[in-house]
Image (spheres, grey):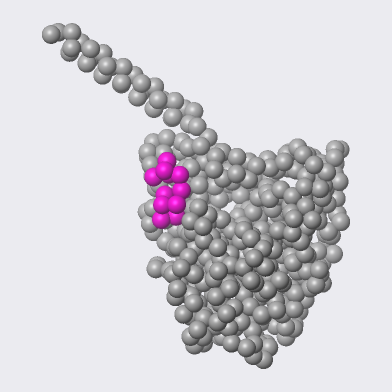
């Protein structure tokens, strides 16, 4: 009879040893997957707390845990409001990851925990937020009575999609209908994820308008000067045809998640990526490519403070995008792949700007033909992607959904989208938290909005004296 207690004690001791060993391993050498998860949690909570003014636990539950990997349900976060820091740990103990708030430049992941380096990487005289007013949109935030038929479309949950947070419909230069999910409003800054890529391209376009960079520029980075990468042109990067290897698979620890959440310098991984094809020969969608474009245009601007204020001075301020927060990595490069927060009204302003071929208030801000590149398909992408960091056929061609052929798209992770239809003088912005596995397609919403449109009225002059006609490819 004494044998059984001894066995139980031995098993209990073994269990303690196993648990202690596992805990020690997780503490000293946590798997990269856990570090990515904690890094993601810290960054998303930080941005939504300090930029959007949301509750940290709500963000953790709704934005991080609900749609993601089951392991994320074991992540715990703490927020230091006084120092603008967020810490995330698996089970509240392991794989510590951090994020830091830096005012007008938003939050950054700090995977190495070096808060001083992250703070010193950006200037503290970054542009202040612009004031809003009640003038009619887009000069201000004023919106008139909605179009009843379009409002009814937006009220259809099937068309709006699961976890919709904001929809704004712009016709003839004015907002004709809008809808918001519970807890969100026209004043809530929302992440665009990869819609940021197109905004980043427009920032580069502003520099191109000033003659400081061109589509044909090559020898773009110092580490590329002595090898085949020296032949990569700006146009190759804009069309996602650089020939650089990059793994954009979000299901595991891949290049994209390593860049975003494990490396304080997001430029390092894509800048050192090997060539897998000649430039212009292969389409590879790559968030690393967008970060490289950020680094390249920042280097062309030159002076450090001027580069950090350039998106505000060159784009956001002229367009009146008062809420826009373009975030910067821990070493001082704009995260041009993913991290722009703005209200739905401001995302719509950017869409109107593209609809007007890069003209605002009668002033040309982008070179002629630059928006045309955003509508021109690349051969290597089989017509899905364009020459300017935008999509023609995300998840299916426009023709397959019965949409106008001139439709082009900005799209982002978890259901962010903006459809621009020049022939209908129309923009439809849809933001939310809608993972791809739910199967939602924004083309169905756009088709219903088009069907509900009244005949186009007289061209509106609110956004600019030149009316929206995108440059032809």
Q: Residue furthest toward the left?
A: 1
Which region shows up in magenta? 62-73
Q: Is residue 165 shown to the viewer in this render? A: no
Q: Residue furthest bottom?
A: 458
Frontmost residue, 128 versus 409: 409
Please name the residue shown 79% across and 56% down the image. 379
Residue at far top of view: 2
Q: Position of residue 208 (x, y in %)?
A: 81, 64
Q: Residue at x 40, y 25 (%)?
A: 22
What residue do we see at 26% from left, 19% from top?
A: 12
- Give the side of residue 68 with respect to residue 283, left or right: left
- Tell me the quadrant of the picture where the C terminus can be found: bottom right
Residue at (68% x, 73% y) in the render: 404
Magenta stretch, main secondary structure, is helix
Q: How many marks?
A: 0
Residue sitting nearer the eye, 373 or 202:
373
From this view, report whether residue 234 is shown above or below residue 205: above
In the image, residue 206 sits, relative to residue 231, either above or below, namely below
The image quarter in which residue 205 lies: bottom right
Q: Quadrant of residue 472?
A: bottom right
Q: Quadrant of the N terminus?
A: top left
Does residue 67 belong to the magenta stretch? yes
Residue 96 visible to an observer of this rendering: yes
State the image coordinates of residue 352 (x, y, percent, origin top left): 66, 76
Q: Is residue 239 left or right of residue 332?
A: right
- The percent coordinates of residue 213 (x first, y second) are 83, 59
Q: Is residue 37 magenta?
A: no
Q: Is residue 190 left or right of residue 236?
A: left
């Amino acid at each position: 009879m004494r044998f059984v207690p001894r066995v139980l004690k031995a098993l209990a001791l073994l269990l303690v040893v196993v648990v202690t060993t596992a805990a020690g391993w997780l503490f000293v050498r946590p798997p990269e997957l856990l570090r990515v998860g904690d890094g993601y949690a810290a960054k998303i909570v930080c941005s939504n707390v300090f930029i959007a003014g949301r509750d940290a636990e709500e963000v953790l539950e709704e934005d991080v845990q609900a749609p993601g990997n089951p392991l994320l349900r074991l992540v715990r976060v703490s927020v230091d409001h006084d120092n603008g820091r967020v810490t995330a740990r698996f089970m509240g103990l392991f794989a510590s990851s951090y994020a830091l708030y830096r005012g007008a430049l938003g939050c950054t992941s700090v995977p190495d925990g070096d808060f001083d380096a992250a703070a010193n990487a950006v200037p503290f005289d970054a542009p202040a937020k612009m004031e809003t007013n009640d003038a009619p949109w887009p000069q201000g935030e004023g919106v008139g009575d909605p179009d009843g038929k379009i409002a009814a479309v937006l009220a259809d949950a099937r068309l709006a999609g699961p976890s919709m947070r904001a929809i704004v419909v712009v016709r003839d230069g004015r907002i004709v209908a809008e809808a918001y999910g519970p807890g969100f409003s026209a004043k809530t800054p929302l992440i665009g994820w990869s819609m940021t890529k197109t905004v980043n391209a427009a920032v580069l376009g502003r520099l191109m308008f000033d003659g400081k960079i061109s589509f044909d520029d090559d020898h773009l980075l110092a580490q590329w000067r002595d090898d085949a990468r020296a032949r990569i042109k700006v146009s190759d990067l804009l069309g996602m045809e650089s020939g650089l290897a990059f793994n954009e698979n979000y299901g595991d620890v891949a290049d994209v998640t390593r860049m975003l959440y494990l490396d304080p310098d997001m430029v390092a991984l894509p800048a050192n990526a090997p060539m897998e094809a000649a430039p212009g020969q292969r389409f590879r969608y790559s968030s690393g490519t967008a970060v490289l474009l950020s680094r390249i245009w920042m280097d062309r601007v030159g002076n450090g403070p001027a580069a950090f204020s350039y998106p505000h001075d060159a784009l956001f301020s002229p367009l009146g995008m008062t809420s826009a927060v373009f975030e910067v990595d821990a070493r001082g490069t704009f995260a041009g792949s993913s991290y722009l927060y703005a209200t739905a009204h401001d995302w719509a302003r950017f869409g109107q700007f593209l609809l007007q071929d890069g003209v605002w208030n009668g002033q040309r801000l982008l070179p002629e033909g630059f928006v045309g590149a955003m509508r021109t398909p690349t051969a290597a992408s089989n017509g899905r992607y364009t020459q300017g960091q935008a999509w023609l056929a995300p998840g299916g061609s426009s023709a397959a959904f019965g949409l106008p052929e001139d439709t082009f798209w900005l799209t982002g992770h978890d259901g962010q989208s903006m459809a621009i239809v020049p022939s209908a003088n129309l923009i439809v912005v849809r933001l939310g938290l809608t993972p791809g596995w739910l199967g939602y397609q924004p083309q169905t919403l756009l088709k219903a909005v088009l069907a509900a449109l009244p005949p186009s009225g007289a061209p509106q002059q609110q956004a600019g004296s030149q009316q929206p006609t995108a440059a032809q490819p």
